[in-house]
Amino acid sequence: KMSASNLKPFTVLVEGNIGSGKTTFLEHFQQFQDITLLTEPVEEWRNLKGWNLLDLMYKDPAKWAMTFQSYVTMTMLDMHRRPTSTPVKLMERSLYSARYCFVEHMMRNGTLHPAQFAVLDEWFRFIHREIPIDVDLIVYLKTTPQVVHDRIKKRARSEEQCVPLSYIEELHKLHEDWLVNRTFAECPAPVLMIDADLDLSQITEEYKKSEHQILKRAVDVVMQ
Ligand SMILES: Cc1cc2cn([C@H]3C[C@H](O)[C@@H](CO)O3)c(=O)nc2[nH]1
């Protein structure tokens, strides 16, 4: 029974590298009224009381990565905890990709000082232990670094223009280790992989496949 104030909607995390088409994927599901879409709050990261934390972070990572990632953590927790009245909730990225992809990368490459990493890691562990975060499915938009690097250039989001291919490659490897190889971190839900290298015209077929899986699983879960 799909109660109106749905306490535990079927929650899907949409994960993938920068430029992998997450926002486009979410927009595809706007056609369904039974789904709440929560896109990544990039605009909040670009304007917190007038401060563009995203730009500050890209311009001087050593100085601003900690500030940026701690604000990202708060905005992600806000999204996880957002009550929805629909039976299905799609979220762009998560506390998990925040910790296992971005923070992990910034610690490994020395952008985050070990003491800063320790604080962010403790925040993640505390939240993970004390606050129920429900995830039922992860849709992984799998891409190759060169393809998304070209898209980032085309998309021309100003803050990202200096992002080197090496950064995209490292983020790709962390997504693969987390969601595919399962080498270093827990995966909180089953993973549905989508070939997101496909360009817009071809990818709608790919989305339709996931549509069936998402809506079918959602019905199974909610009708239990
Ligand atoms: C959870 C999470 C999302 C996220 C995005 N970003 C960056 C990558 C992109 O340039 C931009 C929008 O996704 O923000 C980041 O540095 N750290 C993040 N952590």
Image: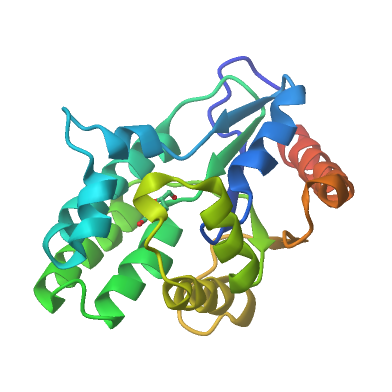
Q: Nearer the viewer, residue 80 or 109?
A: 109
Query: In the rendered image of this protein, does residue 54 appear above or below residue 185?
Result: above
Query: Where 54 falls versus 9 (above or below)?
Result: below
Where residue 139 sits: x, y (%)?
A: 67, 54
Name the spot of residue 2 as percent of width and height, x first.
71, 22
Q: Is residue 17 above or below residue 170?
A: above
Note whether residue 1 is visible: no
- How far across and down, in percent of the image, does residue 13 sit? 57, 49
Q: Residue at x 16, y 27 (%)?
A: 49
Q: Position of residue 51 (x, y in %)?
A: 17, 36
For image coordinates 40% across by 64% down, the residue present is 163
Residue 84 appears in the rendering: yes
Outermost residue toward the top in this view: 4
Is 162 in front, or is 200? 162
Res 89 quadrant in image: top right
Q: Is residue 54 left or right of residue 102?
A: left
Horizontal side of 218 relative to 6 (left or right) equals: right
Marks counted in the figure total 0
> Which quadrant of the figure has residue 75?
top left
Q: Quadrant of the C terminus?
A: top right
Residue toward you, 2 or 106: 106
Q: Is residue 39 left or right of residue 24?
A: left
